[in-house]
Image: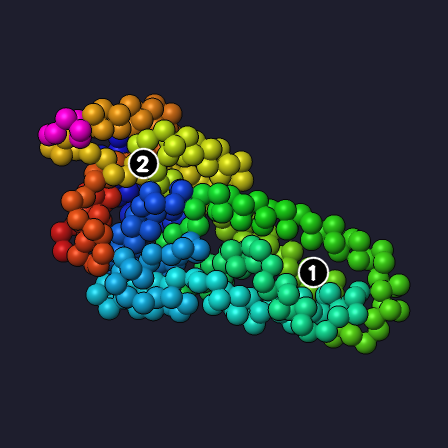
Amino acid sequence: MSAEGLSFLDEEKPRIVMFCGKGGVGKTTSASATALHFARGGLRTLLISSDPTPSLSDILEVDVRGEITPIEAAPGLDAVELDFDTVVEMWKEKFGKEVYEVISSFLPVDEEIIEYVANAPGIDQEFALSYIYDLYAGGGYDVIVWDTAPAGGTLSLINLQDKFYRHLGDAARLYVRVRNALEALTRGRAKRDPLQIIAEWEKLSKSVLEMLKDKGTKAFLVTIPEALGVNQTQRVARELARYGINVSGVIVNYVLTPEAAASEFNRSRREMQSKYIAALERQYGDEMHVVQMSLLPFEVKGIEALDAVEKLLFPNRSSD
């Protein structure tokens, strides 16, 4: 077990901190407390949630849906919750015209095709990566703390980005082979060379993947000490490593302390939890940080409650 919690992040100074895991394990809580810690340390911090069923506004007790919002109770901290409708509108504004130009260069379509593509499954999560990259590259924040979608969605998103990047090169080569025939059919529709647009998409996709693999990006797996949580953590860790993403630690949430295990029921649950915690420490303890977070006796809502979580995650923090 790591006695220092996540305090090592203060020395490593990451640019992006990702929290991954299945739904309901405390990803948003862990991300929020970590973002609060960075802001209190004087860093310009953005807390962003791309979870399709977000709870960030509820935890912060501030409406941050769809727009980057300063958190008055935590100077230096901004937050945003990317809801589907907002993301789709941002996608159409940034990429809609380009998509139309590319598609209309080989098919007789009008601009209604933008709306059709915008509502394709996965577009919202795919654009979330581009949105985060723009904020990352823009340099307006010292650190971005990202509460990701539940594990399956996050892995699918990274896989989609990886495939998209590789397929764009194929798309450009195919377009070169057939462009003369296409131009004869659609002459005058494209304002820009579609190959230029595809090349720009390919460059952006490569940059997004490089951001995820950069040593300044730290991923944490949030789990619970039960079979389902541990098994999924192992699967997600393997998949993230396969994509070259740096997994820095495992946060085991909702752990019963000895003091909380006074009743026979809780003693039995603590014994069960201890078995799975030991398995995680055996598997990951030598290569990454394994941090335990005790089950709290109150609901985590508001800055004061997050302060208690921050103390658990960063036990070595300086006193305010």
Q: Is residue 60 left or right of residue 67?
A: left
Q: Residue at x 20, y 25 (%)?
A: 268
Residue 266 lies in the magenta-colored region: yes
Q: Residue 11 or 200: which is nearer the viewer?
A: 200
Quarter of the picture holding the C terminus = bottom left
Which mark is on residue 198?
A: 1
- The residue labelled by disc 2 is 224
Q: Residue at x 56, y 72 (%)?
A: 93
Which mark is on residue 20?
A: none
Q: Is residue 15 visible?
A: no
Q: Is residue 300 visible?
A: yes
Q: Mark 2 or mark 1, which is nearer to you?
A: 2
Above or below residue 237? Residue 203 is below
Which structural element holds mark 2? loop
Dot 1 crowding, Cα within 10 Å, few <14, some 14–19, many 20+: some
**Dominant secondary-structure state across the stretch colored magenta:** helix
Q: Is residue 239 left or right of residue 223?
A: right
Which structural element holds mark 1? helix
Q: Which residues are magenta?
A: 262-267
Q: Residue at x 68, y 68 (%)?
A: 113
Q: Residue at x 88, y 63 (%)?
A: 180
Q: Is residue 12 left or right of residue 317?
A: right
Residue 234 lies in the magenta-colored region: no
